[in-house]
């Protein structure tokens, strides 16, 4: 009854609850469409970025140091999958964009799962999940459901890495939807997911001078 009565105001007018949540879903689809259209340019922009410092920290926290099963969630170019593979991990790559899947397959020589976050159905499969600049496209309304799926996919004791633009905005920027986080909003998100325990929270600067990133390492409780 409350949901039926709910309305949201936008520049286009009033939305019912169902219409409003539908608009939230469209934000993810808009972001996927961006990668279908501009995947080649995005690949060239990001494929050579150096994430080795954070990747090394991620490895330090993994419960298994050799042959760890890792999910590269929203793998993009496959850049970090190659690094993790060279470090001795067994990497599964996943991306919601068909274009990025094709480009990552060419770049890495490995198959990439074409799957959106909400289509995931993994149960205690991975020692670690690397979600570098991927979950930042999930709207606030859908984040809890996605976080549950991500947590399900981790083995007990497994490690999750996530990164987000730093801030308080939830908006379309440059034809993509972004949901930004601060230290406080990230702590609140993890508070709602007690199976995860925060291990480290820190800020970094983008080497392309495109702003500040919030980085998170969390562990699934045993």
Image: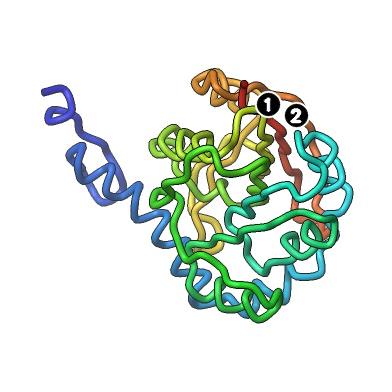
How many discs mark residues in the rendered view?
A: 2
> Percent from the top left, x then y, of residue 166?
68, 39
* Residue 30 horizontal side relative to residue 80, left or right: left
Instruction: Give the label, 1 or 2, closer to the camera.
Output: 2
Mark yes or no: residue 162 visible: no
Element marked by disc 1: helix
| C-alpha gap between disc 1 and disc 2 | 7 Å
Which of the pair 220/206 is nearer the observer?
A: 220
Badge 2 is on which residue?
A: 201
As drawn, 33 above or below 50: below
Mark yes or no: residue 210 visible: yes
> Percent from the top left, x then y, of residue 136?
57, 47
As drawn, 120 above or below 162: below
Instruction: Name the residue at 71% across, 56% down.
Output: 90
Instruction: Name the residue at 55% across, 46% down.
Output: 135
Badge 1 is on which residue?
A: 183
Element marked by disc 2: strand
Which of the pair 54/156 is nearer the observer?
A: 156
Q: Are marks 1 and 2 in contact (CB under 8 Å)?
A: yes
> Percent from the top left, x then y, of residue 67?
76, 50
> Percent from the top left, x then y, of residue 198?
68, 23
Graded by Cα atoms within 10 Å as few (under 14), some (14 to 19) or many (20 or more), the crowding at tag 1 reads some
């Amino acid at each position: 009854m409350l949901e039926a009565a709910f309305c949201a105001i936008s520049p286009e007018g009033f939305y019912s609850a169902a219409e409003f949540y539908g608009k939230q879903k469209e934000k993810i689809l808009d972001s996927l469409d961006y990668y279908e259209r501009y995947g080649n340019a995005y690949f060239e922009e990001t494929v050579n970025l150096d994430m080795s410092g954070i990747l090394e920290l991620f490895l330090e926290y993994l419960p298994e140091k050799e042959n760890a099963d890792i999910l590269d969630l929203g793998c993009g170019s496959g850049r970090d999958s190659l690094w993790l593979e060279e470090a001795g991990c067994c990497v599964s790559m996943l991306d919601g964009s068909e274009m990025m899947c094709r480009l990552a397959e060419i770049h890495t020589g490995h198959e990439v799962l074409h799957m959106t976050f909400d289509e995931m159905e993994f149960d205690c499969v991975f020692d670690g999940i690397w979600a570098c600049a991927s979950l930042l496209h999930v709207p606030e309304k859908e984040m809890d459901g996605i976080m549950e799926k991500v947590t399900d996919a981790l083995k007990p004791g497994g490690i999750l890495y996530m990164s987000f633009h730093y801030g308080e905005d939830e908006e379309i920027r440059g034809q993509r939807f972004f949901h930004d986080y601060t230290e406080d909003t990230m702590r609140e998100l993890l508070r709602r997911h007690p199976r995860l325990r925060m291990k480290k929270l820190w800020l970094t600067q983008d080497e392309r001078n495109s702003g500040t990133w919030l980085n998170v390492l969390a562990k699934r409780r045993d």
